[in-house]
Amino acid sequence: MICLESISWTAPGGGFGLREVSLDIPAESYAVLMGSTGCGKTTLLELLCGLRMPSRGKIRLDGQDVTHLEPRQRGIGYVPQDLALFPATRVREQIRFPLKMRGLKDDQGLVDELVSELGIGHLLDRLPEALSGGEKQRVALARALAARPRVLLLDEPLSALDEGTRTSAMELLRALWQRHRLTVLHVTHSSAEAAALGRLRLRMDGGQVTPA
Amino acid sequence: MRRPFWILLIAITAGYLAFWFLLIAATAGFSTPQAWMQTLLKPEIRYAAGLSLITCTAAAALALLFAVPIGYLMARRDFRGKTWVDAALDIPIVLPPMVVGICLLIFFQTSLGRQIERLIPLTYTVAGVVLAQFVVAAAFAIRTMRGTFDHLSARPEQVALTLGATDFQAFWHVALPTARRGMLAAFCISWARSLGEFGPILVFAGATRMRTEVLPTTVWLELSVGNLDSAVAVSLAMIVLAVLVLVLVRATGERV
């Protein structure tokens, strides 16, 4: 489960911040976080990833205090809004990246399994610049899942997709969540996405998270 | 109202470029191709050209070695005193070239400098030519690499951290491959700067024929004995090299 205990964070310069945010997301649940632009949703995900350090409070994942752990030690898969594919790396290497960084061999065929599951076998030799929005999104998901995360954080992952692609992408997210038994925190502005995917719906307002 | 304004700007640009073309054309038309070839085939000129190519390449490679980590640090991290560090990195650009040479000469007379000279003799040597070229070229390479990393999103590197990479692995496997065009541009710019470097080399490495003589030194030596044809021929060769570097840099998509 994801547990935030009175997390506070202040932006450099002090203008913006999160104050005493507490949050509990049960294991293997799909939580959707909504809120107005600039309310701190992305900051919250970055705090969970370890890309930002809170000034106060604790972050626990499956009961383990990860507040001071490096991002690579947290077991989190992160798909940011711009997907952040590595510009100079082919799709095959993007998906193998987490295994390579940990010095692991793909004995169980994890990469092949993800490639088949996400239907991206024909994209493996391409660079990100040669992918469509929907293809990029699938590659970013495969790359995040190749790290075998216990928690998947999605920052408006469907915002750049057209209506038809978005519907199939929502089905894909639901299937991945169930098949990989993930705990998901999905940030979105879309009420339709929240209604379709969210088993737990949350709203962020004034630096606080409350049930929607 | 706007048209005369834009016509004025175009006229200023055209006038400036025409001035440069006239300068180069006048230099090119000063003597004959036969005279150029005769000059460029002289052993001392061939030595200077060869030494220039070697030392410029070594200085540019060395500059890149420092520019990549410094540029990455300045683009990616905020720290106390960063503005001052940023200004300090530009010191070689604003210092008069002769002063850079004098600083080098004096430093290598200090006790620390002498210790270094025991390991690698630098004053009045070919290694000194490389060092004199490096100190100025590195500042330009650092500027270019910082600009490159500033323009690249840090997000892929951040995602790499969540995927199991250390800071170094994210830099090595994600940032560096993405910045390869900027690295090529930084190398070319520092190479071109090194090719034109004269003041620090003259003061620190000297102008000894067939020893520490590089192309700018040749121009100066030939001018000082009144051999204008040779000075012009070598200058034209340097103009051709500089234009080739400019074309290469533009082809990489980076602005000098």
Image (cartoon, coloured by chain):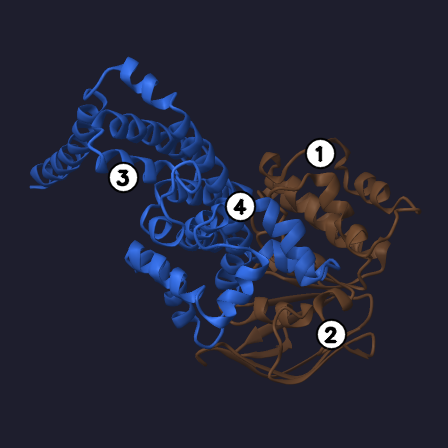
Chain colours: A brown, B blue
Q: Residue at x 32, y 22 (%)?
A: B39
Specify the quadrant that holds the C terminus of chain B.
top left
Q: Nearer the viewer, mark 2 or mark 1?
A: 2
- Residue B27 versus residue A102 in the image, above or below: above
Q: Residues within 10 Å of mark 3 (few under 14, many from 20)?
A: some
First in residue order: circle 3 vs circle 4: 4
**Amino acid type for the residue under numbered disc 1:** Leu
Q: CA distance from mark 2 to mark 1?
A: 34 Å
Give the residue pinned by disc 3. B220
The residue closer to the viewer here, B17 or B99, is B99
Q: Nearer the viewer, mark 1 or mark 4?
A: 4
Q: Residue furthest top?
A: B34
The residue closer to the viewer here, B239 or B51, is B51
Q: Are marks 3 and 4 on the same chain?
A: yes
What is the number of the mark on residue A69? Answer: 2
What is the number of the mark on residue A123? Answer: 1
Q: CA distance from mark 1 to mark 3?
A: 58 Å
Image quarter for residue A178?
bottom right
What is the number of the mark on residue B61? Answer: 4
Residue A163 x, y percent position in the rendering: 59, 43
> Numbered disc 4: what chain?
B
Q: Are marks 2 and 1 on the same chain?
A: yes
**Amino acid type for the residue under numbered disc 2:** Leu
> Numbered disc 2: what chain?
A
Q: Is residue A14 left or right of residue B31?
A: right
Assess whether mark 3 and mark 1 are in contact (beta carbons under 8 angstroms).
Answer: no
Element type where label 2 sits in the image = loop
First in residue order: circle 2 vs circle 1: 2
